Amino acid sequence: MDKPIYKRVVLKLSGEALSGDKKFGLDENTIIKIAKQVKNLQQSGVEVAIIVGGGNFWRGRSSKEMDRSTADYMGMLATVINSLAMQDALENIGVLTRVQTAIEMRQIAEPYIKRKAVRHLEKGRVVIFAAGTGNPYFTTDTTAALRAAEIESEVILLAKKGVDGVYDSDPQENPDAKKFDKLKYKEILNLELKVMDSTAASLCKDNNIPIIVFSIEEPENITKVVFGAEIGTKLKED
Ligand code: UDP
């Protein structure tokens, strides 16, 4: 475990991963801990793209009354707040970053341009993709799948709060829930496991992108996974 096993990774952080022990918003200490792990990877020569969710502020589907698209755009804006927080923490410890957003806001971030994103990665900059796909009715897990395919990432690191892998039932409700070490995408789709939405799972299946699901409660897991430790659950096609 002395060398990273991946050259280019997409790290998907749920919004809640940035809220630490709080139920809402941002916890700066937590963000700093995650940033240090990203710095480890960058210093080991791994190219890192980050996608942050927005669930620590708002999820479109939590609204019953609001127009769905409006609620979803609000969710995408929440991901921009998180992306800027992540950028700030990384730059404070000397990691060069670029935020690229799928919804244009020129004062604070570059627009998403795939070729530019790849160039930044090649130069050792961490690229943070904000505002999801830019479209309502999607999630940031789907964004991770889409961007991973576009930038030819070898893997998606799906860092979750409150769960350390994929289980056959909710481990918080069922003490006998069984954790999977490995799983095929079609099993996720067939068993309707709630690890990610079906659009994201299909996209990864069709493009053969492996995903590793693990707990962000121990931020060191990020480095461990990239250096080959078998933690969490690995999702693959074969
Ligand atoms: N969202 C969207 N399109 C996208 C990505 C995100 O509409 O391409 C909205 C959607 O409302 C979603 C919210 O942004 O609920 C926050 O993203 P997500 O729920 O994926 O965040 P996470 O659960 O990872 O914190």
Image (spheres, grey):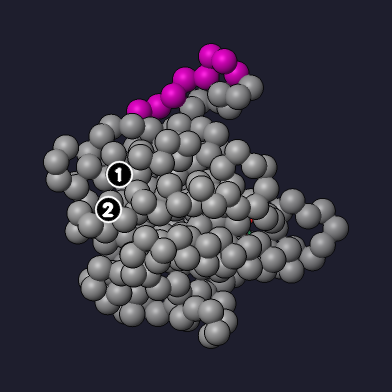
What amino acid type is highlighted by mark number 2?
A: Leu
Residue at position x 47%, y 20% from top? 178
Q: Nearer the viewer, residue 50 or 90?
A: 90
Residue 183, located in which quarter of the rendered image?
top left
Up/down of 131 relative to 21, above or below: below
Q: Is residue 186 visible?
A: no
Span highlighted in magenta in the image: 174-181
Which residue shows up at 28% across the image and 32% down it? 230
Quadrant of the rendered structure where residue 171 is? top right
Label 2 CA crowd tier, 10 Å (few <14, some 14–19, many 20+): many
Q: Residue at x 79, y 65 (%)?
A: 67
Q: Secondary structure at mark 1?
A: helix
In this rendering, the answer to whether 126 lies above or below 38 is below
Whole-percent x, y for residue 208 in the image = 31, 52
Amino acid type, mark 1: Thr
Residue that label 1 marks: 223
Task: Name the residue located 32 percent from the left edge and 60 percent from the top edge.
Answer: 48
Q: Classify residue 51 as left or right of residue 56.
A: left
In space, the residues marked 2 and 1 are separated at their CA atoms by: 6 Å
Q: Quadrant of ligand 1?
A: bottom right
Residue highlighted by disc 2: 41
Most frequent secondary structure within the magenta stretch? loop
Looking at the image, can residue 67 be seen?
yes
Q: Are marks 2 and 1 in contact (CB under 8 Å)?
A: yes
Q: Position of residue 90 (x, y in %)?
A: 40, 61
Q: Quadrant of the C terminus?
A: top left
Q: Position of residue 1 (x, y in %)?
A: 16, 37
Measured as percent of width and height from the top left, residue 56 is found at 63, 51
